[in-house]
Amino acid sequence: MILSVLFLSTLVLFAITSVLFRSFSTRRVDLGREFALSGQKALSEGAPEKAVRDLRLSLSYAPDETSNQLLLAEALALAHHPDQARGYFLALLDQHPADGFLNLQLARLARQRNNRQAAIPYYRAAAVGNWSGDSIDERFHVQLELADYLAELGDLRSARAELLVAVADAPEDPAVSAMIGRRFEQADDLPDALKYYKKALKLDPKNTAALVGAERVLEKIGEGSPSVGSPQ
Amino acid sequence: MSTEATLIDATPPLEATASLPMREERLFLLLSIFIGVLSGLLVVSFRVAIEWLSMLLLGVAPAPGQKRLFLIPAAVGLVVAVLTRYVFPGVRGSGVNQTKAALYIHNGYISVRTVIGKFLLSALAIGSGQSLGPEDPSLQIGAGVASLIGRRIGLSRGRLRLLAPVGAAAGLAAAFNAPISAILFVIEEVIGKWTAGVLGSIVLAAIASVAVARWFWGAQPMFQIPSIALRDPRELLAYSVLGVIGGFAALLFAKSLEYLRPRLRAQPQWLQLLQPSIAGLLVGCIGYFGLPEVMGAGYGAIDQAMHAQFALKMLLLLAVFKIAATTVSFSSGTPGGMFAPTLFIGAMLGAAVGSFEKIFFPHLTGSIGSYALVGMGVLFAAFLRVPLTSVFMVLEVSGNYSIIFPVILANTIAYLISRILQPVPVFELLTNQDGLYLPSLEEEREENELRLEDAIESMTPPIVAGSHSIPEILSTNRKEDLLEPPCLLVQCSDGWYAARRDELEKLIAGSLDDPSAPSTQQPLEENLGKDRTPIIFPDQPLAIALSYFQRWPVLPISNRAARGVLEGIVSLDGVLRRYQQTRL
C-alpha cells in the first residue's frame, strides 16, 4: 500500500517537475534566442563589444547553442580578445575535433600570436577536416592560406609542397589558376607559376593578372634560365 | 499498519524469523531507488526555482549600475530572516551539518517543515543574489525526503538513521550531476566512515537521482574544457603553485568564517533578524559597483573563467570578493551552501594562475580552462577537507580524465597546507560553533586504531590435544604444570577451547576419583563444552576481543595462512593494559 502511494507520489512530482522544467526551458530558449539575435545584429553592424555582451548573455541561457558559441568566439576575436576567443574555440574543438572551421579559426588565432607550432597543425587539421557546404572548395582555400603562411614564414619549400597538394582540388577557373600561379611565384617555384599562368591564359587569354604574372615570371626565368619559352 | 508489520504478519512465524532481514534489506534497496528518484525530482525543481527567481528578481541581464542589484537582495534578505526565525527555524546555514546532526543526534529525523523551508528559503536567498550555493541544501532536501519516507514506512530507528545519508547522497548527486563525488562526500563528511551496510543503498539512490537529473538537464558534464596534454613537466610546477595558493586561500576563507560567524551569532536577536538583509545589501553593492558575477551561485562566471573570459586582475578581484561575499552571506545565517562559492573561488584562482602563466611563460601549453578546473578541486580539497571527493568531483564535472595528474598533485598540496594551518576542518568548526561535536572521516583517519597484534602475548598457556583422554594427558604432563597457569588451551578437532583452571581441576579430580568411568576414557574435548573460541587474527581490531572475555579467559590468535598455528594469545588484562598505554 505504502509503496503504491510512494509510486503515485513519484508520478505526481515527476509531472509537476516536467511542467515547471518545460516552462523554464522555453523561457530560457526564448531569452537565448533574443540575445543571440541582438548579438548577431551588433556583429553585423561592426560593434563586436556589444555582440560579445549579448552573445554571452545568450549563451548563459542557451549554453549548448554551438552556432552562438562560434559567433561569440568570432566576436571575441574581432573585439581583440584573442585568448578568450581561443578558449572558446578550443572548448568547441574538444566536442568536434574534426571540424574544419574550428581548426581554421584556431590556426588564424595561433598565427596572430606568432605561434607557428600551433598554427600549422591547426591549418593541416582544417585542410582535412569536416566542412559544411562545398568542402572541396573550403579545403582548397585552407591549403592556399597555409601555403601563404608558410611563404610568409620563409619556408618556401613547405609552401610549394602545400600548393602542389592544393592544386589537385583547384577548380578549372582562370582567376583561380592565376591566383595559384601567383602563389607558386611567391613560393619561388617559377616553372609551376608559369604553368598556372599559362593555364589561366588558356582558359581566358585576356586575363590580365595571368598576363602580367607570366611576363614577370618570364623575365625572372630569362635572367636565370633562358630556355623557357613564351606563354603564347 | 506499517509495511514492516504487514510483512511479519503475512509470513509464518518460523519463516519470518529467517526471511525478515532479507526482506527488510530488499525493501531498503527498493526505498533507496524511490528516494533517489524523488530527491532528483526535488533537486531539479529546486534548481529551476532558483533560476526562475533569479530572472524575476535580478532581471534577465544583470549588469553593474542596476539599483535592483542591491535593493532586491536586501529586501529578500529581510523576508528570509523573518521566515527563518518564525516559520522554519531549522534551515539556517549549510545543509551538511544539519544532516549530520540529524544522523548522529536525532536518529536520522529531519522534519517536513525543514525540507520545505530549506527548499523555499534557499531558493529565495540564492535567487536574490546571496553568495551561496544550492548543493548543500540539495543534500539536506534529499536527506529529508529519505527521513520522511523512512518514517512513513515505519522503519526501525537503526534503519531510519541509515536512510538519511542515502537521501543526502541522492540530493547531492542530482545537484552536481556527479554520482561518485556525492557518494564519496557523504561517506567522507556525513557518515564519517566507510560502512558496507549502507553503501549499496547510497550507490543506488545516487544513480537514480542522477538519472532523473540527466533526464531533465541532459547528460553533458557541468563544465567542458579541452583535453590536457602535459607536454612540459614544468607545467606541474605551475599546478603546484596553484595548490599552494589554493591552500592559503582556503585558510583565509575558513578564518574569515571562523571570525565573523560567531560574532554575528552573538548579536542581539533583533540585529540577527537584520543580518541576512545587511548581507544581501553588501553582496548587492559588490554587484552594483562592478562585480555582479559574485552574486548567486556563480556557475555562469565559472564557465566564463574556464573559457578565459576574464583578465588576470578581474579573476583575482572576483576570488577575493567572492570570499568576502560568501563569508558575509553564510555568517548571517541565510540558508544556502558553500559548495558553489568554493568552486567559484577555486576556478578564479586557477584561471588567474593559468592567465599568469600565459602572460609570463607563453611557451607552456596548459589552457586557462584546465587551471580553472584544477583550482576548483584545490579549493574543494583544502576548504571542505574532502581530498578524495575533490579529485572525483573535478573528473565528473568536467568529464575529462586527462586532468587527473595535475588535480591529484595540486589537491594534495592544498590539502596538506590546509591541514597544517587549520587543524579543525571547516564543517567541524561550524558544528563546534553551534555547540555540536560530530564525527568525521578525517577525525577517524587521525585515530590509530589498535589491533589484536598490539596486545598479543607470545607466552601461551599449556596446550594439550583434545583428542587425548585425561589419563593420557596426565601421563605426559605433570598435574601441577597443567594446573599452575590460570587456563589451558585445548586443541580440539573443530577449533580451540580455552579451559579455566577450575574447569580443568574438576575434570582431573573426576577422572582420578573414578578411573573406570566412561567419561574418563573419553577424549578431553568431549568432556568440555561444545562451543569453541572465536577464530580471530592479528590484524583485526582489538576491540572485537572484549566481548569474548566474559566467556573465555584468553583468546588464541590464529595465523591467517595456517589456522592451526597460533600467533599467540590475548587476555583481558593485556588488552586493557594496551588501551591504557594508548591513552597515556
Image (cartoon, coloured by chain):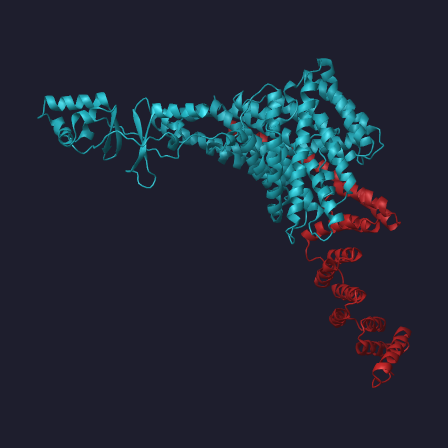
Outermost residue, left side: B516
Measured as percent of width and height from the top left, residue B122 is found at 68, 27
Left or right of A175 in this view: B81: left
**Residue B469 occupies which quadrant of the picture?**
top left
> Which residue lies at the image location 72% right of the left edge and 63% below the top edge?
A124
Q: Nearer the viewer, residue A151 or B171?
A: A151
B357 shown above or below B345: below
Measured as percent of width and height from the top left, residue B176 is found at 63, 37
According to the rendering, which colour does chain A have?
Answer: red
Tell me if I can see residue B224 in this picture.
no
Left or right of B386 in this view: B195: left
Tell me if I can see residue B305 in this picture.
yes
B125 shown above or below B414: above
Q: Nearer the viewer, residue B285 or A27?
A: B285
> Which residue lies at the image location 20% right of the left edge and 24% below the top edge?
B483
**Residue A36 occupies which quadrant of the picture?**
top right
Left or right of B528 in this view: B224: right
Q: Nearer the viewer, residue B256 or B329?
A: B256
Q: Total number of numbered labels?
A: 0
Measured as percent of width and height from the top left, residue B384 is found at 62, 32
Measured as percent of width and height from the top left, residue B533 is found at 29, 29
According to the rendering, which colour does chain B have?
Answer: cyan
Q: Nearer the viewer, residue B346 or B252?
A: B252
Which quadrant is home to the C terminus of chain A? bottom right
